[in-house]
Amino acid sequence: MGRPAKFTRDRILDAAGALAAEGGAASITIASIAARLEGPVGSVYHRFASRDLLLAALWLRTVERFQEGLLTALAADDLEQAALHTPRWCRENPIDATLLVLHRPEDLVPRWPDELASARAEVNTRLIDALRAFLERNRGIDDTSVLFAVVDVPYGAVRRHLLGRETLPARLDELIITTCRAVTGTQQTG
């Protein structure tokens, strides 16, 4: 039985995410990741054949982590929890939040690796399908209102604070819920 890997895929991605949060996409190099891990460059290349592949994997992992709670709320037809997911997730995952909210995939990976193209399409499709299913089950709410309440408002609310490297105020949640109720004409009980 071999010894466990010292530089796992997740450890490498965590180091890359921390570098992105601190200095933006340009600060992420294979050498800077290896330095952060206090390991050899070869250990990074052992897991990821290129910087583009590593950054694409980082972006996909971050999106999947973010979408988990949002998809759960939409599947439960809980529009308010779906709207609150973004600020809550950002508070709990500040490094991932900085990466996801402040960087488009094209900022990180100018040429998306072919081997991850289907995975990228899948994460985008998963959210679209969840929103469509929610709208199908809740026919009284229009799609523009749901997108505004669940995507646009929370994203805009957290982005300004993340850009300023500020803590997200607790009041943000109340404002997001008020907006959600106003634009969708809903109010959940209990």
Image (tube, rainbow, N blue to C red):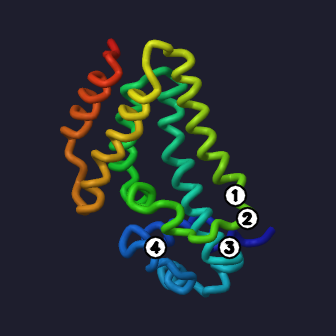
Crowd band around label 4 with a 10 angstrom C-alpha radius: few (<14), some (14–19), many (20+): some
Note whether 173 is above or below 51 in the view shown.
Answer: above
Q: Residue at x 67, y 85 (%)?
A: 42
Q: Which amino acid type is shown beneath numbered disc 4?
A: Ala
Q: Give the foreground label among 4 and 1.
A: 1
Q: Give the foreground label among 2 and 3.
A: 2
Mark 4 vs 1, N-terminal side: 4
Q: Residue at x 31, y 47 (%)?
A: 156
Residue linked to disc 2: 114
Crowd band around label 3 with a 10 angstrom C-alpha radius: few (<14), some (14–19), many (20+): some
Residue linked to disc 1: 117
Q: Which amino acid type is shown beneath numbered disc 2?
A: Asp
CB within 8 Å, label 2 to label 1: yes
**Element type at marker 3?**
loop
Q: Which amino acid type is shown beneath numbered disc 1?
A: Ala
Instruction: Report how far apart the C-alphas of labels 2 and 1 lie in the structure.
Output: 5 Å
Crowd band around label 1 with a 10 angstrom C-alpha radius: few (<14), some (14–19), many (20+): few
Left or right, residue 53 beside residue 98: right
Q: Residue at x 37, y 75 (%)?
A: 23
Residue linked to disc 4: 25
Residue linked to disc 3: 48
Q: Quadrant of the C terminus?
A: top left
Note whether 157 is above or below 163 in the view shown.
Answer: above
- Residue 147 at x, y percent in the picture: 43, 33
